[in-house]
């Protein structure tokens, strides 16, 4: 009897997790759409290279298309990966990219914190920020300056990132917030 119950329980638990995964995927789609919309609105006022970010490559990365310019020498594509558990780097971050690329792929890892209810604006800013890393590399100040510039050009407002800016010692970097 126990041998029969265990597989049934595993299947039931897996089925219970499916709605949460579907909800997370929908939130990710909304965040990507929001980031793409903000970028499209800001694009006419961005140069070819902003804060050291190749804007054409960034547009392709945001569209989850292959891009070849930026920090990497060969074609790269961003691949979103939703993590169900807050383990490893997901204990500290809402999202992160794994760079350098592996076999032409930069995983964009989305942690449980990314899916916090009511954080739509922050999800969009996070996508804008992480795509800078996917294109240009590890510099946190560069990523936040670029993402804030896009947000400000598109919406006329800035999400407060002062604590982040201080924690990463960005005041002494080459980058400035808008």
Image (cartoon, helix red, strand yellow):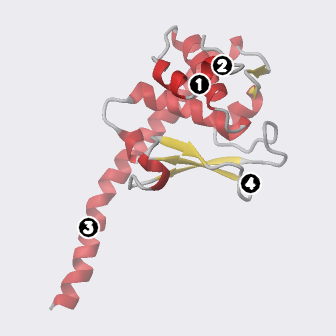
Q: Which residue is mark 2?
A: 172
What is the secondary structure assignment of the residue under circle 1? Answer: loop
Looking at the rendering, which quadrant does residue 134 occupy? top right
Disc 2/disc 4 C-alpha distance (Å)? 33 Å
Where the N terminus falls, by quadrant?
Answer: bottom left
Left or right position of 69 against 92:
right
Q: Which residue is mark 1?
A: 169
Mark 2 or mark 3, which is nearer the start of the sequence? 3
Q: Residue 152 at x, y = what percent? A: 56, 12
Mark 4 or mark 1, which is nearer the start of the sequence? 4
Q: Would you say the residues marked 3 and 1 are in contact, meaning their CB atoms lie under 8 Å apart?
A: no
Looking at the rendering, which quadrant does residue 83 occupy? bottom left
Disc 3/disc 2 C-alpha distance (Å)? 50 Å
Mark 1 or mark 3, which is nearer the start of the sequence? 3
The label number, if any, that marks residue 13 in the structure image: 3
Q: Residue at x 35, y 46 (%)?
A: 23
Q: Would you say the residues marked 1 and 2 are in contact, meaning their CB atoms lie under 8 Å apart?
A: yes
Mark 4 or mark 3, which is nearer the start of the sequence? 3
Left or right position of 132 against 163:
right
């Amino acid at each position: 009897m126990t041998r029969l119950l265990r597989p049934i329980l595993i299947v039931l638990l897996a089925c219970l997790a499916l709605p949460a995964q579907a909800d997370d995927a929908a939130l990710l789609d909304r965040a990507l759409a929001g980031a793409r919309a903000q970028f499209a609105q800001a694009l006419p006022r961005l140069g070819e290279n902003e804060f050291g970010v190749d804007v054409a490559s960034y547009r392709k990365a945001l569209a989850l298309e292959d891009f070849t310019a930026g920090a990497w020498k060969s074609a790269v594509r961003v691949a979103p990966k939703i993590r169900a558990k807050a383990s490893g780097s997901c204990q500290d971050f809402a999202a992160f990219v794994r760079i350098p690329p592996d076999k032409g792929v930069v995983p964009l890892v989305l942690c449980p914190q990314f899916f916090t209810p009511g954080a739509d604006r922050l999800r969009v800013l996070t996508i804008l920020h992480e795509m800078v890393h996917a294109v240009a590399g590890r510099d946190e100040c560069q990523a936040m300056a670029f993402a804030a510039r896009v947000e400000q050009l598109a919406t006329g407002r800035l999400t407060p990132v002062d604590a982040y800016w201080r924690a990463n010692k960005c005041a002494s970097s080459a980058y400035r917030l808008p």
